[in-house]
Image (cartoon, rainbow, N blue to C red):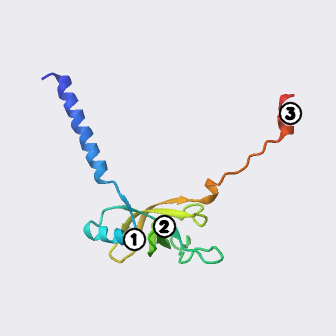
Amino acid sequence: MKKTHIIGLILIAVAIGIILITTGDASTYVGFDEAERISQQDPNQKVHVVGTLRKDAAGQIVGLNYNPALDANRLEFLVQDSLGRENQVIYAAPKPQDFEKSEKIVLVGSMHSDKVFYCDKILLKCPSKYQEGKISADSTASVAAKN
């Protein structure tokens, strides 16, 4: 065999190995019930849970516990998943910017035996970021720029 054939086979084997590793680490979108079931089978399996923050009539998040003076890397809150189950979530990192404004959130993490969802990553969907705004051009500024 030529050296180029051997190198080509090695590269193909490495590519197949990378594909297998990344597919084995891929997580799925589930509710809290399914996350609990998955954690009983494989405690290290990460899942995505889509949900909404529970808010009161004044728009304040219910069950939010965050005190940066005591521990800036601990955020606790309640989330209702898309199937209606409400669950406590613990996020071991600082509170994300615009957390209170989020419409929906995606939690990446795993359920533990204490029935608390431990989150590694939070993805926020804030309505203000996706609303179309009207941009108005100042006609006097464009006339002044031409002169």
Q: Amino acid at mark 1?
A: Phe
Residue 31 percent across, percent down from the top left: 40, 68
Q: Quadrant of residue 3?
A: top left
- Disc 2 target residue: 51
Residue 60 percent across, percent down from the top left: 62, 74
Q: Residues within 10 Å of mark 1 (few under 14, many from 20)?
A: many
Q: Residue at x 24, y 43 (%)?
A: 17
In the rendered image, the vertical position of residue 64 relative to residue 145, given as above or below = below
Is residue 110 left or right of 91 when viewed as pictured?
A: left
Quadrant in the picture for the N terminus: top left
Q: Residue at x 46, y 73 (%)?
A: 84
Q: Residues within 10 Å of mark 3 (few under 14, many from 20)?
A: few
- Label 2 vs label 3: CA separation? 49 Å
Is residue 38 left or right of 8 when viewed as pictured?
A: right
In the rendered image, the vertical position of residue 84 relative to residue 120, given as above or below = below
Q: Secondary structure at mark 3?
A: helix
- Disc 1 target residue: 32
User: How many callouts does the rendering have?
Assistant: 3
Is residue 25 left or right of 7 when viewed as pictured?
A: right
Whichever of callouts 2 and 3 sits on the residue coming sooner in the sequence is 2
Furthest residue toward left? 1
Is residue 15 left or right of 1 when viewed as pictured?
A: right
- Disc 3 target residue: 143
Whichever of callouts 1 and 3 sits on the residue coming sooner in the sequence is 1
Q: Amino acid at mark 3?
A: Val
